[in-house]
Image (tube, coloured by chain):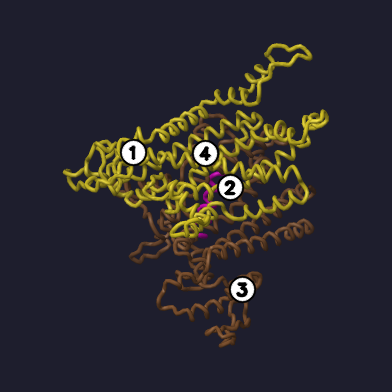
Chain colours: A brown, B yellow
C-alpha cells in the first residue's frame, strides 16, 4: 500500500509541474499585463519602465517562470531611465512566489489574489457542498429504489423523470423553479423564496435568511446532478444485485434488507467513490451558470467577472487552483479506491 | 427483445459451407435495431425537424429576426398572456403587456419577434451539434490512433498530454479560450495577419468559429482515450492477425479493418456528448461570450429573458424549451445508437 501511494504521488508531481508551466505560458500568451497603462495619459513612459523592472517583465522567460513560482525576494534589477547605458537605480523584487501563496494583486479588487479568493471561496463551498451532499443522498435513495424495482411502474416513472431532468439545461430548470417558487408563490400569498444573493440586501444576515437564499440554487444544482448520478447508481446496483454472491447470500436465507444494504450496497458503492472523488474538485470551481443566475457571490461568479475585466492574475490563480485540485483528488481517489478494493493494487 | 434477436440470428437461411453467406453489415444491423427503439426514432425525428427549421429559417420565420419595433417591445399574444397569470394585458387592472397577436410567441425587450429568433437560433445550436463532434473526432482520432498504434514513448507522451488537459475543467477552459480569442483576434487587427483573418472569419460567421474552436480544443481528450483503447484492443484481434498473415499492407489493415471496428463506440460516445456541446454554446451565449449579436442564439435569448423573468416569463422560457427539446432528442438518439451499435451495453445505463 505504501509503495502504491508513493508511486502515485511520484506520477502526480510532474503533472502538477507541467500544469503550472502551461498556466504560466497561457498567462504570457494572454498579453502584456501593463498594456492597460498605455491608454492612461497620467502614466509616464518612465513609470512603465520602472514597473516593467519591478515585475521583471524583461527577464528571460525561464527566470520569469522561476521567479513566479518561487518568488524574487531580494533580486535586484537595474533600471536605465535615460537610456545612456548607466544604471540609474535598481528595483528590488518583493514577490514571494505562488508556492508561498503569492499570486500577485487583482486589478479589479485592488487586493492580493489570495484575499479575493478567500472572500469568494467560502460562499462557493457552502453552496457546492450542500448541493453535493443533497445530490449524493437523494441519488443513492432513488438509484437503489429504482434498481430494486427494475422495470416496475415506479422504476419507469423514475427513468422518465431522470431522462427529462438530464436533458434539461440548468437555466431552464432554474427559471422554472424561480417562476414557481419565487414568483407564483408570492402571487398566491404563499411563502416565496428569494432569487438572488446570499442575504437580504436590507441587512438581515441571519442563518435563517441564508438558508432561504440557498434553497433555489441548491435545488437546481442538485436536481440536474441527481439525474445522471441516480442512473449510475441504479446501473451499478443492478450489476451487483444480479451477481452470484448476492444469490448465494439470498439462498443462505439472509433477510432481504441485510442482502441489499450489507452485501449489495457495499459493493455497489465502490464505483461511487470514484464518482465522488472525481467530482469533488469541481465544487471549488463553483457552478458558473447557477451562480450567475442566482447572483451567488461565489467562485464561478468571480471567474466570469475576472475574465470580463481581464484580471489576469485572478484568472491564473483560479485555473491553477482548480487544476491542482483535480490532480490531488484524482490521487486521493486512487488511493482510497486501492484501500477499499485490494485487487486494484496488484495490476 | 433479446429473444427476438436470437431468433433472427438463428432463423436465417442455412448457408452451405464455403458459400459466402449474405452477411448483414454492422451498420445495416444497427439501423434495424435503431428503428425498433421508439424513443430514439422520436429523437431523430425532432432533430430532423430542427434541421429543416434551421435550413429553411428564412422561409419559416414569420418576421425578420433583427428588426426592432420599439412600439411592440415586450408585446405578447393573447394565448401567452392567459398562460402566464402574472402577465396582465394592457387595459385590464394593473395591466402592462402590449397585446399583439402578430407575434406568435411574443416579442423581446427590443421588439423583435421571439418565434423568428428561436427559428434562427436553431442554426447556431445545430451547427455546434454537428461541427463540435467532427472537430473533436478528428483531433481525438488522430491522437488516439497514433498513440495506440505506435505505442511506447509516443503513446506515453500523448497520453500524459491528455491527462494534463483533463486536469482543467472543460467549461472553465472553454470560457477562458473564448475570452482569449475575443481579446487577441477580435478588435482592431493589422490586415493580412493570421489574427486578422481569423477575426474576420469569425465575424462573418456571427462569432461561431471561435465557439467551434473553443469547444473542439477542449473536448477531444475523451475521443483520444477511447480510440487509443479501441486500437489497442483491436490490434491484437485474430482477424487483424489473419489479415496480416495473408499479406495485407499495414495501411489497408488500418483503414479496412481497424477503423470500421473502432468507429462504432466513437460515434456513440460523440452522439452522447452532443447535448454537452449544445449546452456549452448556450452557456457561453448566456454569459455573453458566445455568438455576436444580433445573431440569435437560444442561450443569449435566455440570458436576455431571464432579466425580466418576473414580468415576461415567455421571453426566457420559450427559447429554454427549444434548447431542452433538442438536448432531449440528442440524448435519446445517442442512447438508441449505443444500444444499436453495441447490444452488449444494453441496459447497462
Magenta: main secondary structure: helix
Q: Is residue B144 left or right of residue A230?
A: right
Q: Rate crowding at label 4 as few (under 14), some (14 to 19) or many (20 or more) other CA atoms within 10 Å.
A: some
Write down the residue under mark 2: B219
Q: Residue furthest right?
A: B245
Task: Identify the chain of the residue marked 3, using the numbered disc in the image.
Answer: A
Write down the residue under mark 3: A97
Q: Which residues are magenta?
A: A124-140
Q: Nearer the viewer, residue B198 or A225?
A: B198
Give how far across and how far down residue A8 sits, in percent.
Answer: 73, 57
Q: Is residue A70 left or right of residue A220?
A: right
Q: CA distance from mark 2 to mark 3?
A: 32 Å
Residue shown at the point (35%, 33%) measured from the top left: B60
Please tell me in which quadrant of the rendered image residue A328 appears. Answer: bottom right
The reply to whether the magenta stretch includes residue A138 is yes
Q: Do the residues indicated by labels 3 and 1 lie within the same chain of the protein?
A: no
Residue shown at the point (45%, 56%) measured from the top left: A291
Give how far across and how far down residue B264 sits, in percent.
Answer: 64, 33
Q: CA distance from mark 3 to mark 1?
A: 54 Å
Q: Return the mark for residue B130.
A: 4
Labels 4 and 2: the sequence-earlier one: 4
- Residue A99 lies, with reference to residue A157, above or below; the image says below
Amino acid at each position: 500500500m505504501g509503495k502504491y501511494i508513493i508511486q502515485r504521488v511520484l506520477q502526480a508531481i510532474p503533472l502538477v509541474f507541467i500544469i503550472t508551466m502551461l498556466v504560466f505560458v497561457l498567462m504570457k500568451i494572454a498579453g502584456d499585463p501593463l498594456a492597460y497603462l498605455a491608454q492612461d495619459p497620467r502614466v509616464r513612459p518612465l513609470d512603465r519602465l520602472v514597473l516593467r523592472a519591478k515585475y521583471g517583465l524583461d527577464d528571460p522567460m525561464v527566470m520569469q517562470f522561476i521567479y513566479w513560482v518561487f518568488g524574487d525576494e531580494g533580486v535586484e534589477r537595474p533600471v536605465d531611465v535615460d537610456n545612456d547605458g548607466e544604471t540609474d537605480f535598481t528595483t528590488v523584487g518583493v514577490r514571494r512566489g505562488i508556492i508561498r501563496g503569492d499570486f500577485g494583486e487583482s486589478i479589479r479588487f485592488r487586493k492580493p489574489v489570495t484575499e479575493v479568493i478567500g472572500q469568494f471561496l467560502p460562499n462557493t463551498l457552502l453552496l457546492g457542498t450542500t448541493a453535493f451532499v443533497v445530490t449524493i443522498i437523494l441519488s443513492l435513495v432513488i438509484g437503489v429504489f429504482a434498481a430494486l424495482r427494475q422495470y416496475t411502474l415506479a422504476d419507469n416513472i423514475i427513468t422518465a423523470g431522470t431522462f427529462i431532468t438530464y436533458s434539461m439545461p440548468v437555466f431552464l430548470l432554474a427559471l422554472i423553479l424561480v417562476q414557481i417558487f419565487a414568483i407564483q408563490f408570492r402571487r398566491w400569498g404563499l411563502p416565496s423564496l428569494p432569487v438572488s444573493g446570499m442575504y437580504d440586501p436590507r441587512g438581515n444576515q441571519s442563518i435563517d435568511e441564508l438558508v432561504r437564499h440557498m434553497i433555489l440554487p441548491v435545488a437546481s444544482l442538485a436536481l440536474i446532478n441527481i439525474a445522471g448520478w441516480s442512473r449510475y447508481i441504479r446501473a451499478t446496483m443492478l450489476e451487483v444485485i444480479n451477481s452470484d454472491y448476492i444469490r448465494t447470500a439470498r439462498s443462505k436465507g439472509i433477510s432481504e434488507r441485510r442482502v441489499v444494504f450489507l452485501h449489495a450496497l457495499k459493493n455497489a458503492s465502490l464505483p461511487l467513490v470514484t464518482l465522488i472523488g472525481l467530482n469533488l474538485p469541481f465544487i471549488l470551481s463553483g457552478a458558473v451558470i447557477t451562480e450567475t443566475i442566482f447572483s451567488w457571490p461565489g467562485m464561478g461568479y468571480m471567474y466570469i467577472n475576472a475574465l470580463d475585466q481581464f484580471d489576469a492574475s485572478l484568472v491564473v490563480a483560479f485555473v491553477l487552483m482548480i487544476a491542482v485540485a483535480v490532480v490531488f483528488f484524482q490521487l486521493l481517489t486512487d488511493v482510497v479506491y486501492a484501500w477499499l478494493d485490494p485487487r486494484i493494487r496488484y495490476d | 427483445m433479446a429473444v427476438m434477436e436470437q431468433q433472427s440470428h438463428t432463423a436465417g437461411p442455412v448457408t452451405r459451407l464455403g458459400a459466402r453467406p449474405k452477411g448483414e453489415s454492422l451498420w445495416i444491423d444497427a439501423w434495424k435495431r435503431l428503428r425498433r427503439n421508439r424513443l430514439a426514432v422520436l429523437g431523430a425525428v425532432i432533430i430532423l425537424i430542427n434541421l429543416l427549421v434551421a435550413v429553411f429559417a428564412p422561409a419559416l420565420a414569420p418576421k425578420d429576426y433583427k428588426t426592432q419595433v420599439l412600439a411592440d417591445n415586450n408585446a405578447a399574444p393573447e394565448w401567452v398572456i392567459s398562460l402566464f397569470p402574472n402577465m396582465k394585458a394592457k387595459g385590464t387592472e394593473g395591466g402592462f403587456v402590449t397585446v399583439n397577436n402578430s407575434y406568435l410567441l411574443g416579442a423581446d425587450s427590443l421588439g423583435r419577434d421571439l418565434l423568428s429568433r428561436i427559428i434562427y437560433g436553431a442554426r447556431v445550436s445545430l451547427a455546434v451539434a454537428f461541427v463540435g463532434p467532427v472537430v473533436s473526432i478528428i483531433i481525438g482520432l488522430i491522437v488516439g490512433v497514433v498513440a495506440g498504434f505506435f505505442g511506447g514513448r509516443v503513446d506515453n507522451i500523448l497520453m500524459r498530454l491528455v491527462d494534463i488537459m483533463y486536469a482543467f475543467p472543460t467549461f472553465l477552459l472553454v470560457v477562458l479560450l473564448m475570452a482569449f480569442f475575443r481579446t487577441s483576434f477580435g478588435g482592431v487587427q493589422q490586415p493580412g495577419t493570421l489574427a486578422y483573418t481569423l477575426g474576420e472569419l469569425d465575424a462573418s460567421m456571427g462569432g461561431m468559429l471561435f465557439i467551434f474552436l473553443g469547444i473542439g480544443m477542449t473536448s477531444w481528450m475523451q475521443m483520444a482515450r477511447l480510440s487509443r483503447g479501441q486500437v489497442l484492443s483491436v490490434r491484437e484481434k485474430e482477424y487483424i492477425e489473419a489479415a496480416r498473415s495473408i499479406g495485407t499492407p499495414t495501411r489497408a489493415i488500418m483503414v479496412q479493418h481497424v477503423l470500421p471496428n473502432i468507429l462504432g463506440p466513437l460515434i456513440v460516445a460523440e452522439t452522447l456528448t452532443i447535448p454537452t456541446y449544445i449546452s456549452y454554446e448556450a452557456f457561453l451565449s448566456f454569459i455573453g461570450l458566445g455568438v455576436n449579436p444580433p445573431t440569435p442564439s437560444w442561450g443569449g435569448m435566455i440570458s436576455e429573458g431571464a432579466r425580466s423573468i418576473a414580468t415576461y416569463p415567455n421571453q426566457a422560457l420559450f427559447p429554454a424549451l427549444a434548447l431542452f427539446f433538442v438536448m432531449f432528442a440528442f440524448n435519446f438518439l445517442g442512447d438508441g445508437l449505443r444500444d444499436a451499435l453495441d447490444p452488449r451495453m444494453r441496459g447497462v445505463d
